[in-house]
Image: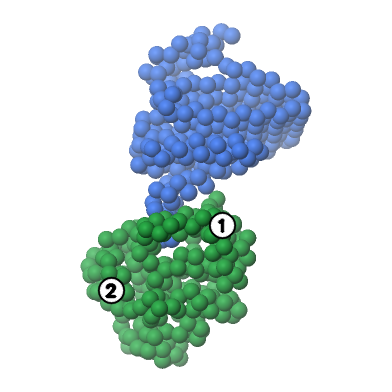
Chain colours: A blue, B green
Amino acid sequence: MSEALVLPTRRDEDWRYADAAFLAASDPATLMQWSEWTIAPGETRRDYRVLASGALAGGTVERLRVHVGAGGRFELGLVNAAGRYARFEAEVTLAEGAHFEFGGVTIGGGDNVQEVVTRVLHAEPGATSNQIVRAVQWGRATGNFLGRIEVARDAQQTDAGQNFKAILLEAGASANTKPELEIFADDVKCAHGAAIGALDETAGFYLASRGLPPAEARKLLIRAFIADAFAAITDEEARLRLLDEALAVLDGEAP
Amino acid sequence: MLEITDLHATVADKPILKGLSLSINAGEVHAIMGPNGAGKSTLGYTLGGRPGYEVTGGAIRFAGQDLLALAPHERAAAGLFLGFQYPVEIPGVSFVQFLREAANAQRRSRGEEPLSGGEFLKLAREKAGLLRMDMDMLKRPVNVGFSGGEKKRAEMVQMGILDPKLAILDETDSGLDIDALRIVGEGINAIMRAPGKAVLLITHYQRLLDYVKPDFVHVLAAGRIVRSGGPELALELEEQGYEAVVA
Ligand SMILES: Nc1ncnc2c1ncn2[C@@H]1O[C@H](COP(=O)(O)OP(=O)(O)O)[C@@H](O)[C@H]1O
Ligand SMILES: [Mg+2]
């Protein structure tokens, strides 16, 4: 547990987008603390969380370490709408045939840095993971997805997917992604996709030409965009709540 | 209803419309024909207020208002409908979802009561029926996976739901097979041939005009109306081609 005592700095690859002032002001013990969960073989655990902008406006770091037993499933839905430095980190170890389903959204403006950092360890054969992250940023905000996948030597028939897309509503906003793969098995499928762009203007005009005011048109398009992240969430109510929480950020703050 | 006077418009700094004038009264159907690249779609987009289509001269009045002072959604609320030559695909947004919001935004801006979910679905079902379109198609993402003909029929269903005063239909007939052409032609008549309404058809072919009979036909070439006439002008164009008629 010695890692819990060392304060990270922006020189650490994993923390390069962190807010220096936030890190310096943090207590290392809380900052580096992990919540540890174990999901028993064959069991499913679902977790949906919202890092809201209000209470966590100053910054927050949440770290979750999960071990998923053989044939188990971990389903995680996240909205990261907090600031000023808001980091959600998950480290998930998958035993044989286990599955990790992750949908994450970062959304916000101002000077916020909102990031999702995952490390998925395919420790045994036949485990699968699917991670979809969407970022919607404006102002000078940044949305990041740092996803690391590690496949152990005998973890054959691994199937690991990662997909990141960002929409930047203003020129000052940015998004970063960096997939990292460490693969020691040979029968492995790893798919990765990433795209960063602006809101589709043609679609916006099409909707406007039908009478939809710009703010509503934009909200519909952004809703469709982030809905991808939660498409695989099996709990319908939770899925809609995550969508609404994410979209609520747009109402008050977006340009 | 629509009065375009000496309209000049540029796209990406390139002058496309160069002094176009056109007047459309309630109850009339006008057809605009003209070679590819003449500026027909540019006219439609300019009337719709598409960003990037910059008006550099002239005036447009629509239903007693300065059209150019209105944002695209306000033009729609004022009664303008643009049928796209290439309807846009929008993954993740269904027709019913956005059309109800759009219809109600229009109604609110006119001081009318919004439609309830039930009222809207009834209206949508009725208009879909008019265009022989399965209601389930309207529950799908906007135009995604639709054939060319289905997209054009879906445009007309939207027009039926939104019930505009003036419809500008940009090559709504292209991509339609013979049966679909008849259905669309009859749909346009059912929705738009009513007192107080008018239609501007942009087309290359006489065949749509066999169903939706125009009162006036105009030839657009190089950004201007170079000839106007009655329905017989469309037949002349069909026989002789643009070059002969425009020359
Ligand atoms: N986005 C654009 N950028 C530059 N030129 C354009 C753009 N859109 C249209 N144009 C040009 O404008 C002219 C008119 O196009 P358009 O209005 O689509 O013609 P039509 O519909 O009559 O075939 C063409 O020369 C076309 O190349
Ligand atoms: Mg055209």
Residue under label 1, please give it: B118
Residue B101: mark in rendering: none
Res A124 quadrant in image: top right
Left or right side of B150 for A112: left
Q: Vertical placement of B33 versus A253: above or below?
A: below
Tell which subunit mark 1 falls on.
Answer: B
Which element is circle 2 on? Answer: strand
Q: Quadrant of residue A16?
A: top left
Q: Tell me if residue B19 comes above or below residue A151 in the rendering.
A: below
Q: Nearer the viewer, mark 2 or mark 1?
A: 1
The image position of residue A175, as x and y in percent, is 44, 36
Q: Secondary structure at mark 1?
A: helix
Quadrant of the rendering where the C terminus of chain B is positioned: bottom left
Q: Residue furthest front?
A: B113
- Return the residue found at the far left: B57
Label 2 and label 1: CA atoms lie apart by 39 Å
Q: Mark 1 belongs to which amino acid?
A: Gly
Amino acid type shown at disc 2: Ile
**Mark number, residue B4:** 2
Q: Is residue B107 visible?
A: yes
Q: Nearer the viewer, residue B54 or B82?
A: B82
Q: Residue at x 39, y 71 (%)?
A: B165
Q: Residue at x 38, y 63 (%)?
A: B76
- Image quarter where the N terminus of chain B lies is bottom left
Foreground: B68 or A142?
B68
Residue visible at 68% across and 28% down in the picture: A45
Q: Nearer the viewer, residue B170 or B73?
A: B73
**Sequence order check, earlier mark of 2 and 1:** 2
- Provide residue B62's location: percent of width, then percent of height: 30, 70
